[in-house]
Image (cartoon, grey):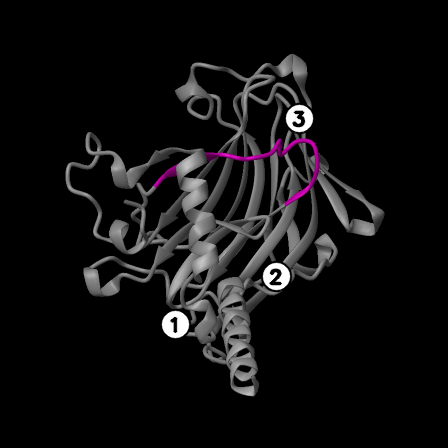
Amino acid sequence: MRRRGGHLVWICLCVLAMADFAIGAAPRKPVAVPFGRNYVPTWAFDHIKYFNGGSEIQLLLDNYTGTGFQSKGSYLFGHFSMQIKMVPGDSAGTVTAFYLSSQNSEHDEIDFEFLGNRTGQPYILQTNVFTGGKGDREQRIYLWFDPTKAYHSYSVLWNMYQIVFFVDDVPIRVFKNSKDLGVRFPFNQPMKIYSSLWNADDWATRGGLEKTDWSKGPFVAQYKNFHVDGCESSVNAKFCDTQGKRWWDQKEFQDLDAYQWRRLRWVRKKFTIYNYCTDRKRFPAMAPECKRDRDV
């Protein structure tokens, strides 16, 4: 009986260990800080409104101008997050953007772009990754919720091994380091963090067929919880002197775990409406990173 009991205990411990492995290493919970801690306005200052001591802000777009902001510092790797409530109602032609970008001709860039739509139609979330000035890696999904009804978290985890896009802790895209396949990866150009609300009715909604209805303006996007946990660096730096010492550099963040891959497959199966990896008309030869990123 003891031997059987010990065997059962061993089985239970193994199951618990497997369950722990399945949960894996989600990014650390973002720390909510006011806008002014990490960010400054970049244009049309009068179109940014502040609330609750700067803990929340609103970006306004009218037929005169949009507006935007950027981080005070530049970062080489880290975890970056903010909560956004998108423009409600008829938002066709508008784009709410949250992205990281370096500042040179062969720039690196990591993009979230939220494309507005006619009332009653879903938002489209477009992501893209630029490396060495080359983009053309668009993916588009519908969200599984209405992003205008409440705040949702949008975040980027970026280290030497991968870039992961998260929506409410659900990975919606991964871009692995595929330098060995001849694909450039952002690793030596510090990036600033940007966000903006602007008019893009020449392309944003149904390829530009749906124009912005200015009678519905001003259009308002709301923000809070401006989390930055990155290696701050000068724009001329070639490396981050703390690499390997931060939580997002550790082994458990070098890849998605089994549970995260399942969540990503769920997003791809249920909500993907465009993926450059499967567009043979535009790209007769599939990009080499696509298989490693499990996009096909």
Between discs 2 and 3, the one toward the N terminus: 3
Residue type at the position of mark 2 = Val
Image quadrant in which the N terminus is located: bottom right
Residue type at the position of mark 1 = Lys
Q: Distance between the residues labelled 1 and 3?
A: 42 Å
Q: Distance between the residues labelled 2 and 3?
A: 27 Å
Residue 149 among magenta residues: yes
Q: How crowded is mark 3: few (under 14 residues within 10 Å), some or many (20 or more)?
A: some
Q: Classify 50 as above or below 13.
A: above
Q: Distance between the residues labelled 1 and 2?
A: 20 Å
Residue found at the far bottom of this picture: 2
Determine which of the numbered discs, if any, sits on residue 238 in the image: 1
> What residue would you read off at disc 2?
228
Residue 261 among magenta residues: no
Please tell me which residue is depicted at 78% across the width and 50% down the height of the picture.
54
Give x and y (percent) for residue 171.
48, 51
Give x and y (percent) for residue 169.
57, 53
Magenta range is 138-152
The reply to whether callout 2 and callout 3 are in contact (CB within 8 Å) is no
- Badge nearest the viewer, 1 or 3: 3
Element on which disc 2 rests: strand
Residue type at the position of mark 3 = Pro
Residue found at the far right of this picture: 52
Q: Is residue 233 visible?
A: no
Determine which of the numbered discs, if any, sits on residue 88 in the image: 3
Of residues 45 and 217, the one nearer the viewer is 217
The reply to whether callout 1 and callout 3 are in contact (CB within 8 Å) is no
Give x and y (percent) for residue 140.
41, 35
Between discs 1 and 3, the one toward the N terminus: 3
Image side of residue 1 versus residue 127, left or right: right
